[in-house]
């Protein structure tokens, strides 16, 4: 039996050897589409073993947590990490020791839930379990019913959507390669989700496999398509910002995602006529690491959205419209004159009492 098992391992891994040896740093070429990847058996799968000349030995096989299955006549056999074709060849070789004609069929009748990791510029990074029937929801958007095999877009929607800093032209998908070697081997593919949402290129939205990692990096600057992306179901739909200072209606304002700074000021009633300094508007932003950044802008009602002059806002931003020099001078005079005016009134009243 050890010799047979050794032979089976060699044969099984002979199939694996036919797969290109890609490391975790390898990037796929366009000739190697992700959609053509084969299913890899893993813990939680329910397989169906059909032996054509031994129906009494046929039946379901559940892959246990350690990746093994209880195989009739043979015992516990590890199948995790192999493709169906590799597993079929191995099981056939193992069963040939006990059966004269081990002709068999191995198929997946109940696949395990797909667990993927989303890291980087998504609203809620983490590990997500996906099935063929899910509900996704971007921040502030309606619930979306997801059905069918999960894709990259489905996973991003379940994680709350992308952040404003997401680099959609360089989304990295990392996927495990077949085989039971240690350490595990992976390959990477780079996706262009802008090509998907703007041009409808479905090849940029591949189906996901268990163990996939989706990494969305940070863009160096907000893409020029930011306003268009605000309407896409990958983005949060609504944000809340604080607009304070010299505006007609200061307070919390609910806006559409990626609303530019000038529009937020207008949503708060606009700047006060002579009290607001349109050349001294501050944007305070709290970063994910807890730090805060402060930038100053000059607002111009005719300015289009841009990072330099009219930046798109994020959820939780605070906008302060400062006072103009005239307003500061007026407030300073009032601060001095009001107490003096009170003293004059008290002195006048005192004189009237003494006169009477």
Image: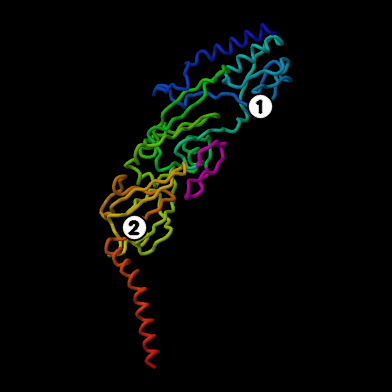
- Relative depth, front residue between 1 and 169: 169
Question: Is 51 placed above or below 2 here?
Answer: below
Q: Is residue 279 left or right of residue 174?
A: left
Instruction: Report which residue position mark 2 lands on.
Output: 321
Q: Nearer the viewer, residue 259 or 355?
A: 355
Residue reaching furthest top?
3
Query: What distance separates the C-alpha of mark 1 from that of mark 2?
Result: 59 Å
Identify the residue at horizontal 33%, vertical 61% (top origin). Answer: 270
Q: Tell me which residue sits at (64%, 23%) in the image.
A: 67
The relative height of residue 337 versus residue 76 in the rendered view (above or below) is below
> In the picture provided, is 300 more to the left or to the right than 198?
left
Q: Position of residue 204 (x, y in %)?
A: 41, 32
Number of residue marks: 2
- Quarter of the image that includes the N terminus: top right
Res 87 → quadrant: top right
Which picture quadrant has residue 276? bottom left
Judge left or right: residue 311 versus residue 49. left
- Residue 312 percent coordinates (x, y): 35, 48
What residue span does the magenta drawing correspond to? 124-145
Q: Which residue is mark 1?
A: 65
> Does the magenta run of residues contain 180?
no
Residue 309, position in %: x, y? 29, 48
Place residue 48 in its image quadrant.
Answer: top right
> Which residue is painted at 39% across and 93% down in the image?
356
Residue 269: x and y in percent read 35, 62
Q: What crowding class fits label 2: few (fewer than 14 Cα within 10 Å), some (14-19), or many (20 or more)?
A: many
Secondary element at image label 1: loop
């Amino acid at each position: 039996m050890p010799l047979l098992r050794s032979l089976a391992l060699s044969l099984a891994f002979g199939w694996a050897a036919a797969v290109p040896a890609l490391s975790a740093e390898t990037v796929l070429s366009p000739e190697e589409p992700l959609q053509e990847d084969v299913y890899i058996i893993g813990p939680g799968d329910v397989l169906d073993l059909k032996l054509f000349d031994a129906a009494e030995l046929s039946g379901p096989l559940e892959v246990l947590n350690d990746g093994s299955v209880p195989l009739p006549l043979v015992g516990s056999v590890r199948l995790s990490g192999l493709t169906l074709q590799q597993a079929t060849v191995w099981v056939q070789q193992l069963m040939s020791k006990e059966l004269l004609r081990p002709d068999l069929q191995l198929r997946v009748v109940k696949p395990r839930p797909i667990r993927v990791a989303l890291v980087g510029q998504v609203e809620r990074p983490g590990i997500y379990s996906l099935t063929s029937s899910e509900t996704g929801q971007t921040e502030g958007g309606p619930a979306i019913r997801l059905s069918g095999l999960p894709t990259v877009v489905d996973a991003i929607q379940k994680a709350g959507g992308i952040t404003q800093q997401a680099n959609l032209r360089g989304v990295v998908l990392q996927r495990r390669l077949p085989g039971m070697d240690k350490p595990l081997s992976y390959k990477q593919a780079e996706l262009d989700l802008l090509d998907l949402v703007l041009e409808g290129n479905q090849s940029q939205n591949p189906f996901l496999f268990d163990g996939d990692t989706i990494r969305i990096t940070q863009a160096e600057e907000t893409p020029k398509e930011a306003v268009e992306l605000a309407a896409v179901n990958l983005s949060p739909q609504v944000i809340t910002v604080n607009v304070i200072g010299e505006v007609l209606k200061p307070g919390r304002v609910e806006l559409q995602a990626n609303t530019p700074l000038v529009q937020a000021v207008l949503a708060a009633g606009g700047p006060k006529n002579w009290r607001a300094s349109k050349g001294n508007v501050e944007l305070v932003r709290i970063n994910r690491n807890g730090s805060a950044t402060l930038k100053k802008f000059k607002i111009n009602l005719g300015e289009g959205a841009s990072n330099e002059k009219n930046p798109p806002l994020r959820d939780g931003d605070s906008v302060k419209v400062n006072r103009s020099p005239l307003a500061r001078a007026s407030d300073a005079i009032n601060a001095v004159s009001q107490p003096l005016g009170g003293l004059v009134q008290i002195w006048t009243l005192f004189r009237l009492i003494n006169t009477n």
